[in-house]
Image (tube, rainbow, N blue to C red):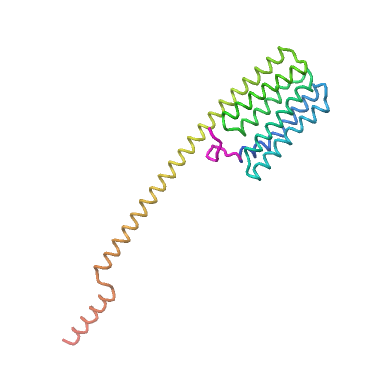
Amino acid sequence: MNENDSDFLTYTQRAKFVRKIFPVMNVFVALIIAFTGTNKILCLSLGLLIPVIGVSSIKIGLRLKKVETFKILSAFLNLINFFFICFLSGPNSPMYLLGIVLIGVWTLLFSNMRSLIYAIITILVFMTLGSFLAGKTFQDIIISLAVLITYSIILVRFLQFTLLLGREVISANNEIDSQKKLIEEKNKDIIDSIKYARRIQSSLLPTEKFIDRILTNGNKNTFNTN
């Protein structure tokens, strides 16, 4: 599944939605992590930096028409940021919440299924490593992974359904457009045939001026005879 403008929602439309909802969700989650974490100020600062990186990359990528480059750059920077938040937040922060936000955003931005799956796997690996270094218990790590994996499967399936539905809608619209063009071409052929028949008819039948001249001459001859 390649990303292109034939998707049900174009990248520009999806990016516009992300720019509106992503910062709000991320701020809310960053506050929760900072409140429950050990390094509150640092975790909050790094958490608030995530939407700044993401939204800025989207804007610059669209402006420079280098969407893929800045999308990958944004994902890489935010993954590094995510790892440090996992590491610095301590053993009690619900880091899976931030993972949910990132996966949700990337599901919208990465309609290429392979890229999305790679991104999700990377998030899971970084969260596991960061949580382990932060001192989380094995049970907490497994629960967080289970939540994110379940959430990711649901989102991926939803994305597949949305893309399939979008392509069916686009295919139906294309079929309607082709039928419309076919009807327009047939109407044009009919109109051209009518115009051609009129030209033939006009060339075979006498003109109005000729008929008027014949009638006028006939009336004159009749008048002279009388």
**How many numbered circles does the render carry?**
0
Observer able to see residue 226: no
> Which residue shows up at 24% across the image and 81% down it?
216
9 shown above or below 150:
below
Residue 115 lies left or right of residue 226; in this view the side is: right
Q: Quadrant of the C terminus?
A: bottom left
Q: Quadrant of residue 114?
A: top right
**Residue 14 in picture, x, y percent from top left:** 61, 37
> Which residue shows up at 34% across the image and 54% down it?
189
Residue 141 lies left or right of residue 163; in this view the side is: right
Query: In front: 184, or 164?
Result: 164
Is residue 6 on the magenta stretch?
yes
> Which residue shows up at 22% across the image and 84% down it?
220
Q: Main secondary structure of the magenta part?
A: loop
Q: Quadrant of residue 215?
A: bottom left
**Residue 138 in picture, x, y percent from top left:** 71, 12
Query: In front: 105, or 81?
Result: 81
Magenta region, residue range: 1-11
Query: In front: 36, or 224?
Result: 36
**Residue 203 in picture, x, y percent from top left:** 26, 68
161 shown above or below 195:
above
Is residue 181 on the magenta stretch?
no
Residue 120 lies left or right of residue 226; in this view the side is: right
Query: In front: 158, or 88?
Result: 88
